[in-house]
Amino acid sequence: MTSGTHALLEVSGIWKSFDDHPVLRGLDLHVDQHQAVVLIGASGSGKSTLLRCINGLESVDAGRILLDGNVEVTQPSIDLDKVRRRVGIVFQSYNLFPHMTVLENVMLAPRKVRGTSGGAARDEARALLARFGLEAKADEYPDRLSGGQAQRAAIVRALAMQPELMLFDEITSALDPLLVGEVLDAVRELKLEGLTIVMATHEMGFARDVADRVCFLHEGVVLEQGPPEAIFSSPEKQQTRDFLARVLG
C-alpha cells in the first residue's frame, strides 16, 4: 500500500451465484483510501454484482467484505443501514423518486437516516446541487431533467450522505453520448477531492485518465490489475488483450 494510506475496502474470496450460475468465483480486491479503482470487463464478468455485494444489496455465498478494517459487510448480523451511510452507490438507471423534486430527493436520506434537520438538509442539498451545476433544477421533478442532469442528481443524492466510499455502476451506459462527458466530469472532480471510488465502466478513455488502478474482471475474478498505463499498453493476460482489442477497436 501507498505510504500514509490504508485499505478502506478489502474483498476476500467472494463467491456469489444466482440459481446454479456462479457470477463471482473467489474474487479478491483491495482499495486504499483516496484511491480510484476502475473495473473493466465484458458484460457478465461480475462487475455489477461485485458492487452490489460491497453495498450489501446482494448477500454473498462465501468470503468476506471488510470496510475500513473494522466493519464486516458480510457478517449476518450487520446493520446494513450503517454500511450504506458510509458506502454510496449510483446506478445507470438514476433511481430518483419521480414524485419528489430534485431537492426533495437529495434531502430525503440525510433527514431519514442521519437525522439531519430539515433546514440543515435543505442548505446542504442546495450547496451540493450548486456545486454540480444543478441549482436551477432544485425544484424540478426528475422527468423534467436530461439524462445527464438526472445522473448528476443521483450522484448528488448519494453524496448527501457524506459517504467514505462511492460505487458507480456503469453510470454513463444509458446516456446519449453527448451527455456522457458532464457525468464523467462530476466523477473526475470527486476523484480530485480525494473521495475513494470504485467504478465499473465501459469508458476506457476515462479509466485511463482517472484510475489509480484498473482491474480487469473475467469470469468472476480479477484476472489482471495494475496502473492504467500497464493495463492498456502492455496487458499480460491474453483475455485482457482480447477484451481491449474488442472495445478499443
Image (cartoon, rainbow, N blue to C red):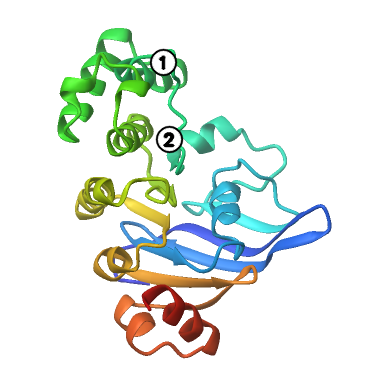
86 relative to 12 in the view: left or right: left
| Residue 62 visible (yes or no) | yes
| Residue 72 visible (yes or no) | no
33 relative to 225 in the view: left or right: left
Picture coordinates of residue 80, whole percent (x, y)? 59, 35
Picture residue at 37% right of the left edge, 33% below the top: 154
Foreground pick, 147 / 56: 147
Q: Tell me the element at label 1.
A: loop
Three-letter amino acid code at disc 1? Gly
Q: Tell me the element at label 2.
A: loop
Foreground pick, 88 / 97: 97
Picture residue at 61% right of the left edge, 64% below the top: 12
Is 56 situated above or below 19?
A: above
- State which quarter of the image contains the N terminus: bottom left
Picture coordinates of residue 83, whole percent (x, y)? 52, 38
Cα separation, mark 2 vs mark 1, equals 24 Å
Picture residue at 26% right of the left edge, 64% below the top: 210
Three-letter amino acid code at disc 2? Tyr
Picture residue at 34% right of the left edge, 17% below the top: 141
Is 166 situated above or below 110?
A: below
231 relative to 76 in the view: left or right: left
Is 15 situated above or below 106?
A: below
Q: Which mark is residue 115?
A: 1
Picture coordinates of residue 178, whole percent (x, y)? 24, 49
- State which quarter of the image contains the C terminus: bottom left
Foreground pick, 202 / 227: 202
Quadrant position of residue 117 = top left
The crowding category of the residue bearing disc 2, from other C-alpha atoms within 10 Å (few below 14, some 14 to 19, many at least 20), is some
Residue extending farthest to the right is: 20
Is 44 situated above or below 216?
A: above
Q: Which mark is residue 94?
A: 2
